[in-house]
Amino acid sequence: MQDREGKVIFRADKRDCVRCDAGFNGDESPRIPALGEQVMDPITAYQVTSMLQGVVQRGTAAQASSLGYPLAGKTGTTNEYRSAWFMGYSPSLVVGVFIGFDDNRSLGEGETGATGPVPIFMDFMREALKGQPKTEFRAPKNAKFAMVRGVREAFRPGTEPKFTAPTAASGPQPYGAAWPDGKVGPTPTPGPGKPPSQAPDIGGLY
């Protein structure tokens, strides 16, 4: 911290920081080296981001995908619609939007994280990302990927699904096994003049 004359009167930590003691001259702010221990495995972090990308791509925040940038996030809504929020981020910017009254009264029926906070997030990010490159979230180099129900998912090495093609030894599936009753072909329908069997009377049970 500096006084009005630019003299350093307090330093919060001891990290080396070039130009931190200099007065402001219009240049970009100094970058302070990161300090602390890693708290999450990179693959786990990427898996979480991948899941939260799904919220934007095909979930409650899908409208944000219209911005055309790689985004991830999560909507939230409390009981009785008292509060609503959206925490969203790009690879370089995190934005949180929270809506609620100070007296904790309801926002109104149907006021969810998708209806209020997400549009606000979109208005902000539309300007914040304007002209910026559409950078994808970076996956750890040792992550493994597999398609799960049409979605590309990340896995820790050794945990990804294994898909094996049938071998000559196992042979093809018997044709009859494709039908539930083991008989080849669909179940025959009653011919003309032969009414289908009636179900037993169970009206007294329902």
Image (cartoon, helix red, strand yellow):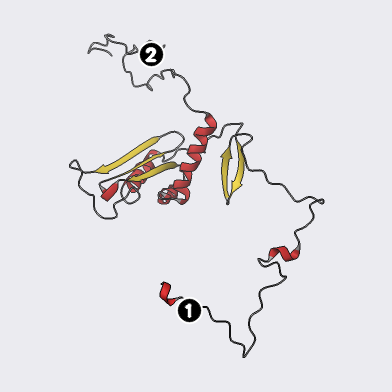
Front residue of 92/197: it is: 197
Q: Is residue 78 left or right of residue 68?
A: left
Does 201 sit above or below residue 93?
A: below
Quarter of image, res 173: bottom right
Ranked by sequence position, the earlier of labels 2 and 1 is 2
Quarter of image, res 206: bottom left
> Which quadrant does the N terminus fall into?
top left
Q: CA distance from mark 2 to mark 1?
A: 88 Å
Front residue of 40/73: it is: 40
Q: Is residue 70 left or right of residue 85?
A: right
Does 25 sit above or below residue 150?
A: above
* Residue reaching furthest to the bottom: 193
Give the amino acid at mark 2. Answer: Arg
Secondary structure beneath dot 1 equals loop
Residue 93 seen in the current view: yes
Q: Are marks 2 and 1 in contact (CB under 8 Å)?
A: no
Query: In the image, which disc is placed on residue 19?
Result: 2
Query: In the image, which disc is placed on residue 201?
Result: 1
